[in-house]
Amino acid sequence: MTATPLIAGIEIGGSKCICILARSPEDIVEQVRIETRDPAATLNEVDAALERWHGEHRFAAIGLAAFGPLELNPASPHYGAIVSTPKPGWSDTPITSRFARFGVPIGLDTDVVGAARAEQRWGAAQGLADFAYMTVGTGVGVGALVADRPILGRGNAEMGHMRVSRLAGDDWPGICRFHGDCVEGLACGPAITARHGPGAVAADWPGWATVEHALAMLIHNLVVTLQPQQIIIGGGVASGQASLIDAVRRRALESLAGYYTASDLPDDFLIAPGLGTQAGPLGAIALGLSALES
Ligand code: ADP
Ligand code: ZN
């Protein structure tokens, strides 16, 4: 019997980076959280964790799941870099090359495709080849698998920046630096903070209607374009507001207006991650395992 390989995973998020040393969700050796600051300080700290783990345990592969946009075309001289991201200081930051010296296979994809792969391997999407993982956190992002492949054209899809019809009577401008009221500009954590002000956001805050509506419109668009068998909604905003997924489901069905009804969509069509808040970090492990297997 061959032992399951040990993988070092790094989920590089807009607010935090999670470094995880694991074989599977049931076999996590260590997990550390590093605040996302400028690239040099953040990646130096990540590097130190990996250095220590490689010395103590010897991992077989590295998985990197990062916010994007990423250069994922292997033919590009910039393969493995975060490219022109709105996140200050992070544009043109090479990621994979920093970890090449460990001499192990490196898997890289977006944080949302990573989380989708983790849900497919261990979580709610087992057996599915057409589904999407959406995060609602520091940003809004969607990792969609179509025929078991992530959408990858000129670059990775950035569906959180879709522009959708606005909730009737709401003209709050949104906070996306590029688009104002794209879905991310209306529904990400920083948008909620900008509109609500500092402090805890009550479950009955009226601004949730805007968030729910924007996400439901994005779901409508995903349903009619990608024909997903399932859409998983994770991220800090979704996990912090228990009623969000049900509200989004209701608004999405209302918007689909009978073209697709609840009975057309499986019971588990719109759900929270099977892996809970570990979907993101385990995404990095799944990407490392895939790199090792391929
Ligand atoms: P990242 O996007 O860095 O991976 P998360 O998915 O945890 O991180 O998202 C962090 C964002 O979620 C922050 O903007 C935070 O303000 C927001 N957030 C976390 N909990 C809640 C909550 N209960 N209500 C609203 N926003 C929240
Ligand atoms: Zn935008």
Image (cartoon, rainbow, N blue to C red):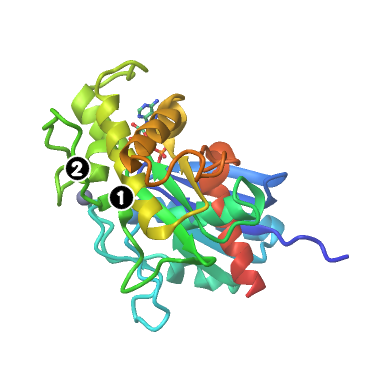
Q: Residue at x 64, y 44 (%)?
A: 30
Dot 2 or dot 1: first in sequence order is 1
Q: Position of residue 103 (x, y in %)?
A: 59, 74
Disc sitting over residue 16 in the figure: none
Q: Secondary structure at mark 2?
A: loop
Instruction: Look at the image and tell me whether residue 48 can be seen.
Output: no
As rendered, which of 132 and 137 lies closer to the eye?
132
Identify the residue under disc 1. Answer: 160
Q: Position of residue 71 (x, y in %)?
A: 35, 70
- State whether label 1 is within 8 Å of ligand 2: yes
Image quadrant occupied by the N terminus: bottom right
Residue kind at label 2, given as amino acid type? Ser
Please, is residue 219 above or below residue 228 in the view?
above
Mark 2, Cα crowd under 10 Å, few <14 / some 14-19 / many 20+, is few
Q: Residue at x 21, y 49 (%)?
A: 163
As rendered, which of 45 and 262 lies closer to the eye?
262
Instruction: Look at the image and tell me whether residue 166 can be seen.
Output: yes
As rendered, which of 207 and 178 lies closer to the eye?
207
Residue 123 shown left or right of residue 265 in the figure: right
Disc sitting over residue 165 in the figure: 2
Residue 194 shown left or right of residue 34 in the figure: left
Q: Position of residue 29 (x, y in %)?
A: 69, 46
Q: Position of residue 136 (x, y in %)?
A: 38, 40
Please, is residue 250 above or below residue 15 in the view?
above
Image quadrant occupied by the C terminus: bottom right
